[in-house]
Image (cartoon, rainbow, N blue to C red):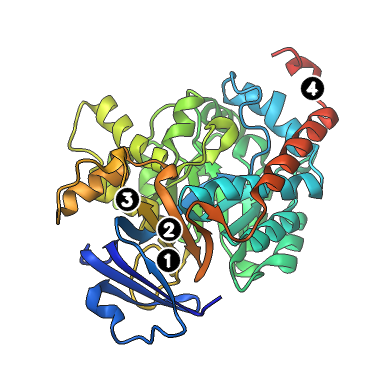
Amino acid sequence: MASRIIIENAIVVTMNDEDEVFFDGAVVVEGDRIVAAGDASVASSYDRADARIIDASGMAALPGLVDLHYHTALGKGWSDHLPLWEYLQSCWYPMIRALDPEAAYWAAMASYSESLRSGTTTVNDMYRQLPALARAAGDIGIRAVLSNDVADDEHDLDTLADNEAAFKEVHGASDGRVEVLIGIEWLPLASGALLRGARDLANELGTGIHIHLNESLSEVEISKEKFGRRPTEFAYDCGILGPDCIAAHCVWLSDAEIALMRETGTHISHNPTSNAKLGNGVARVPEMLAAGLNIGLGHDAAECNNSRDMFQVMKWSSLVHRATRVDASLQQAPDVLRMATRNGSLALGHDTGELSAGKLADVILVDLKSQFFTPLMPMSKEHIYSHLVFSAEGSCVDTTIVNGQIVMEGRQFTTIDEAEVLARANECFREVIDRMVVPAEYANL
């Protein structure tokens, strides 16, 4: 594959500091980096002889989307009629306890292929069997930040020792595309000793933390009963929060907890589609933004979402707040697209999220030649933003480039046999279902 890629004749949506959009634009990639992005002239000084030329006429080039809270998932649509606690006990935990490396690998391949197909180039994935996930990320070409599903020992999930071993085995794999954070499932399955140990381990390894916080009202009540503190308050007491911490959901943050997030520089993943499907509520995003918090977007898991399409998440992340606050001024399209690109990249400490010289070459091309983008006013930045957030779907993505490698072009994968991935994921799902052991009190839900 050519080390230089020249994308020309595109509408280039940079997401840079100046919020520039070039309507006859070009992006030049050398190796794993963007070396130029701007109007058509930026490509003229680069040798085309050995370059891969992509004619992006009728397409928009934009940064790859960052899915800031993600779980590899094997059981989309299975037993998904339940609220969060009952679903976890009857389906999610029994399923991930029954995983073996083979099932985890094909689950990740199926999950990552759907994400890449819909324009996501980075996932922040909390799951199990991390070496298998890292192998899948390497094979398919996605940028994957992985963390274990760590809980206290009696819950038979992962331990801090598992997470440390995974870090030492796969952190930095696939030319740096694979990283490992320390993962904490959530406070109902954790102790103060586990949380303090997670912070100590993250500091020792020089990595960050990925944790669920304040996802549901039941979690808040359990935390108050168990620790005498609300979840984010207790996480703060144990040293979990900080600029290297990504807190997922945060639906039920109090004013004091928002202040703790601001004080510590903790990043938040807003997951509106999952929160809605599970009946967990609507996060106080306007207040969080007013406090200056960095908020990215995540789909959560296909079991509590049924789609890994981040275009859907973007739309919901605006509409749900406008509806519940009766305020159409909230969550304007450019701000939402920034949440799905630059904000997520910032949370992960990545050099992605915008099309600018020096940034890692995570680029997607979105086909504008469809009803999704009709009508499209020429030279209207506002119109292209609106369509990308409120109209587009993942099926509009034509090409996905990660780390300078074309992993999908013309809707066809270059790195995998997609039919094999889907077939093997189906087989593994049935095998895991056969191995699942559901606690008796939840067996008939």
Give the amino acid type for the residue marked by disc 3 in the picture: Leu
> What is the secondary structure assignment of the residue under circle 2?
loop
Q: Nearer the viewer, mark 3 or mark 2?
A: 2
Neighbour tally class for label 2: few under 14, some 14-19, many 20 plus, Cα within 10 Å:
many
Q: Position of residue 81 (x, y in %)?
A: 59, 18
- Residue at coordinates 64% horizontally, 40% vertically from top-left? 73
As measured in the structure, the alpha-carbon distance from the residue carrying label 4 to the one carrying label 3 is 42 Å
Tell me the quadrant of the picture where the N terminus can be found: bottom right
Compared to 426, does 411 lie above or below? below
Label placed on residue 64: 2
The part of the image, by quadrant, that contains residue 176 is: bottom right
Say which label, 4 or 1, has the lower sequence index: 1
Residue to which mark 1 is pinned = 352
Residue in front for this viewpoint, 133 or 112: 112
Tell me the quadrant of the picture where the C terminus can be found: top right
Q: Position of residue 129 (x, y in %)?
A: 75, 51
As measured in the structure, the alpha-carbon distance from the residue carrying label 1 to the one carrying label 3 is 14 Å
> What is the secondary structure assignment of the residue under circle 3?
helix
Marks 2 and 1 close (CB-CB < 8 Å):
yes
Say which label, 2 or 4, has the lower sequence index: 2
Q: Position of residue 90 (x, y in %)?
A: 71, 23
Compared to 256, does 173 lie above or below? below
Give the amino acid type for the residue marked by disc 4 in the picture: Pro
Give the amino acid type for the residue marked by disc 2 in the picture: Gly
